[in-house]
């Protein structure tokens, strides 16, 4: 009889080697084990998919519902620093012991079914939520939608925040192909909310084909506002004189509108007052999404890792006002559209600090340097040069270089892979010397 791991870290190390593929899309395996575990929810479930904006939308939903006094479970991925970030109950990460208990339960029921790391951990967290006596569950969908493990759950409301090009090797290379995959989280007769202002026709067609109750931005819900406040308008509900979400960025009103549309669709099961919406939006927090740290030089953390997110980051940087120089700490996975990300930001960055990342599928700093050269970024690395490109082994080393050379009126944008932002956050948390 095998001995099961006793700590969370031991479990996670084991799960990384249990399945032959890191990503193996499909619902058959996860659905079979889900049924054996008897996972079901009596409370409303909201799933949130999309290319970008998922994390922000989930965080706003959680914050508003917590302000309304509900017991809320939130599942997101990936994490930045600690695995426990993926599972929150009432705004707090769950404990190691709670996760270890659920991992053992999944292991006991999976039998001969081989599960990926993501499938196994998703099932454990779903079972934890199902047993926690919650009033609402919010589930961020991982890669795609249709074949993602989270889609084994039939949600009461499904949100697709945006559709753009990413993960082309799994989802296809056009917005129409990707839109079809994202729309796979919609369910017949249930609210299907799309926050993308220009949704691909495939998403609309799929929602209509299955008989989902499709809510489109601009048709079924929208927003308006000025510099001081904004208003939400839905099918039968208005929210006026709202403060702007504390999450910074140009797209956050789109995300907030989609969240409020979901709450409107659930208003008879999860009623939420006007002040609770206001408080929830003002108090919401989400690390690594255009997160501006206090102090000088300004430091911005943003997990923008595809061209769509990079374009939003560029717009947000423009809205910050004037800075003499912008330093970039940039690391990415090799399967990402690095050229597309660079194209959005090359004219906004003066000094590039490129970094490798601790994963085999990460792009090397030299590959990133080549992408910059291909985009026409021609640096001069002589002392005092106004445009430089340098390579480093880790995000923290790249950040230390930028921090030590930036003037107090400059800014440092840390972006790309979650691991880029996490590497800098971990250095700050452990108070490594600058």
Image (cartoon, rainbow, N blue to C red):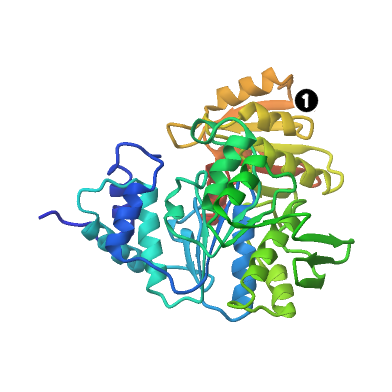
Image coordinates for residue 296, horizontal then vertical, percent: 75, 52
Q: Position of residue 293 (x, y in %)?
A: 69, 55
Residue 104 location, quadrant? bottom left
Left or right: residue 137 compared with residue 345: left
Task: Name the residue rendered at 31%, 64% in the picture.
Answer: 102
Q: Is residue 287 visible?
A: no
Q: Please tell me whether residue 259 is drawn above or below residue 426 in the rendered image.
A: below
Total residue callouts: 1
Q: Residue furthest left?
A: 1
One can see residue 109 in this view: yes
Callout 1: SS = loop
For label 1, the crowd category at 10 Å Cα-Cα, with few meaning under 14, some 14 to 19 and many 20 or more, is few
Residue closest to the eye, 398 or 252: 252
Left or right: where does residue 305 sit relative to residue 171? right
The part of the image, by quadrant, that contains residue 132 is: bottom left
- Taking depth in this image into account, of 396 and 319 the one nearest to the observer is 319
Name the residue carrying label 1: 385
Give the residue at x 73% y 33%.
344
Residue 98: x %, y % from top left: 35, 68
| x, y percent for residue 417 | 56, 40
Q: Please tell me which residue lies in front, 169 or 26.
A: 26
Q: Quadrant of the N terminus?
A: bottom left
The residue positioned 80% from the left and 37% from the top of the image is 325
């Amino acid at each position: 009889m095998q001995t099961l791991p006793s700590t969370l870290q031991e479990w996670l190390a084991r799960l990384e080697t249990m399945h032959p593929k890191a990503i193996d899309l499909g619902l058959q395996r996860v659905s079979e084990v889900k049924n054996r575990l008897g996972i079901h929810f009596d409370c409303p479930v909201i799933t949130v998919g999309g290319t970008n904006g998922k994390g922000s939308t989930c965080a706003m939903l959680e914050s508003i519902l917590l302000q309304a006094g509900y017991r809320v479970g939130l599942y997101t991925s990936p994490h930045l620093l600690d695995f426990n970030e993926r599972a929150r109950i009432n705004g707090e990460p769950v404990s190691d012991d709670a996760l270890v208990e659920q991992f053992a339960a999944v292991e006991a029921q999976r039998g001969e079914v081989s599960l990926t790391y993501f499938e196994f951990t998703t099932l454990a967290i779903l079972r934890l939520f199902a047993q926690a006596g919650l009033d609402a569950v919010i589930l961020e969908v991982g890669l795609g939608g249709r074949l993602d493990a989270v889609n084994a759950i039939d949600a009461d409301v499904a949100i697709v925040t945006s559709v753009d090009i990413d993960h082309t090797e799994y989802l296809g290379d056009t917005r129409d192909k990707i839109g079809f995959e994202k729309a796979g989280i919609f369910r017949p007769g249930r609210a299907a909310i799309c926050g993308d202002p220009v949704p691909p026709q495939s998403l609309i067609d799929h929602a209509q084909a299955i008989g989902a109750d499709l809510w489109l931005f601009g048709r079924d819900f929208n927003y308006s506002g000025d510099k001081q406040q904004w208003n939400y308008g839905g099918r039968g509900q208005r929210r006026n004189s709202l403060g702007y979400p504390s999450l910074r960025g140009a797209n956050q009103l789109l995300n907030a509108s989609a969240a409020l549309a979901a709450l409107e669709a659930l208003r008879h099961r999860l009623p939420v007052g006007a002040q609770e919406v206001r408080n929830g939006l003002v108090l919401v927090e989400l690390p690594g999404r255009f997160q501006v740290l206090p102090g000088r030089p300004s430091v911005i953390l943003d997990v923008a890792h595809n061209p769509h997110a990079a374009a939003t980051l560029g717009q947000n940087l423009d809205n910050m006002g004037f800075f003499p120089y912008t330093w970039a700490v940039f690391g990415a996975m090799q399967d990402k559209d690095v050229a597309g990300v660079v194209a959005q930001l090359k004219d906004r960055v003066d000094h590039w600090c490129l970094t490798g990342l601790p994963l085999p599928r990460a792009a090397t700093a030299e590959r990133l340097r080549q992408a910059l050269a291909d985009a026409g970024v021609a640096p001069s690395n002589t002392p005092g040069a106004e445009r430089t490109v340098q390579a480093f082994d880790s995000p923290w080393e790249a950040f230390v270089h930028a921090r030590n050379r930036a003037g107090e009126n400059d800014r440092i944008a840390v972006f790309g892979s979650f691991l880029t932002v996490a590497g800098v956050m971990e250095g700050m948390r452990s108070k490594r010397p600058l």
